[in-house]
Amino acid sequence: MTTDPTTSPPPGPAPQIRLVLAAVFLVYLAQMTLNPIIAPLSREVGLAEWQVGVTISAAALMLVTTSQIWGRRSQSWGRKPVLVGALAFGALTTALFALISWLGMTGAITGVVLFVLFVALRGIGFGAAIAAIPPTAQAYIADVTDDEATRVKGMAGVGAVQGLAMIGGSVVGGLLAALGLLTPLVVVPAILAVGVVLVATRLRREPRTALIEQPRSVRPTDSRVWPFLLAGFGVFTSLGFIQVIIGFIVQDRLGLDANAAGLLTGAALLVAGLGTVIAQAVIVPRTGWGPATLLRGGGAVSVLGFAVLVPDVGPVVLFASLGVIGLGIGLAMPGYTAGPTLLVDRDEQGGLAGLSSANMGLTFVVAPTAGTALYGLWAPLPIIVGGLIMTVVTVFVLAHPRFRRLPALPDPAQQPEDSATGS
């Protein structure tokens, strides 16, 4: 088959997908290094559980409000400037967060002022930095992959490195917490600084990701994508209901002090991350399942994990249930991210990637606050609600016709000129 040179990107060196995934890994490694200590840290500085939920929800709000903007800017400005700027801003805000946490632990800053600074730095500042990374990576992968299997594998790579980051962050955060809660807070800005140097010095401009002056946005109500958005919203809402309370579950069920809770919460997140990595680095590439199958299978597995987590029957079952939930989420995520990319044009990919990330962030605006509030009422309640939501998602994906009629990725040689050039 011949290809019209006016509609096909020029040949070039192999895409730097691994380098882009490395940037995703580092920013999530930083986030996951903080996660094991956020619950015990909040109690150490005198903040309530709901104030932790608000802090995490503020980060999610930034994801919602800025992700589609970042996705489109990555197409108009370029992937490298967005990645470097986001990593640098993340390093700055986490360094300031470490300083404020130290002042809170010494009693120099307390009460409302401390809470506001937690929200401003860990929530709004770091949240805005994280918001730029996934849509930029996903839009890059959508640009440089030419068939469904490769694209699903690439999108699974984004989730896989997030799972690896969960494992690495759980280990790093947990072990460093044993040296004191401030230790991981100091390490996190250094991790992000490594990312700045790596991307600034190594990432080149891709000929297959040529800049688009006015990339198109994608509406949430677009019939091509809203079923995926709804399914993804349910998946991440279920995850959000339990993610922020894992530290409380571990500390309360096992009767631990703050430092021990940080260490074992890291171990619990390690198990969940291992489940995600197995799903996305082993199962997804070897099975070749399409997006709909991944969503169905992942939903069913997650429901099982939630059901096992509800009763308090000891640490072994607690850790095993988190691993099963991680496995299910790991299967569902690439189905959610890859599916709609098969349905939109190239100049919509940045907007779609941002919309997908914003949709995920929207769940974490409400879920952490709701999860912590429900936990205060009755500890198993957020787990039960999360499992019910995941059940509804699984049934929806089984029943809705959109998930039964996904097209093959179109041949680039057959695309009209305006779609290929982004004009």
Image (cartoon, grey):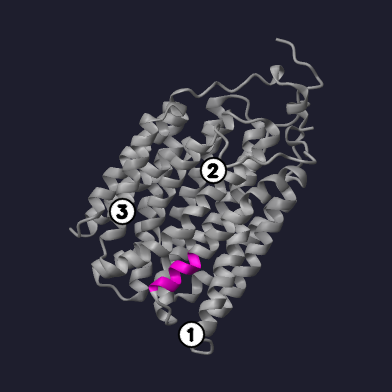
Left or right of residue 267: residue 198: right
Q: Which residues are magenta?
A: 49-56
> What is the x, y in percent for residue 234?
41, 46
Quarter of the image containing the C terminus? top right
Residue 405 can be seen, yes or no: yes
Labelled pair 1, 2 in contact (Cβ < 8 Å): no
Q: What is the spatial separation of the Cα atoms under label 3 and label 1, in whole angstroms? A: 31 Å
Q: Residue at x 73, y 40 (%)?
A: 215
Q: Position of residue 312 (x, y in %)?
A: 20, 60
Residue drawn 43% across the image and 43% down it: 277
Element class at badge 1: helix
Q: Residues within 10 Å of mark 2 (few under 14, many from 20)?
A: many
* Residue 53 within the segment the image draws in magenta: yes
- How many other residues sit within 10 Å of disc 3, few (<14), some (14-19) or many (≥20)? some
Of callouts 3 and 1, the N-terminal one: 1
| Residue type, label 3 | Val
User: Going 31% across and 53% down the picture, which residue do you hit?
Assistant: 385
Tag of residue 111: 1
Of the two numbered discs 1 and 2 in the rendering, the one whose residue sits closer to the viewer: 1
Q: For the residue marked with disc 2, what is the amino acid?
A: Val
- Quarter of the figure with residue 340: top right
Residue 177 appears in the picture as rendered: no
Front of the two marks 3 and 1: 3
The disc, 1 or 2, on the residue closer to the chain's N-terminal end is 1
Mark linked to residue 385 = 3
Where is residue 88 shown, x and y percent of the image? 68, 62
Residue 417 in the image: above or below residue 79: above
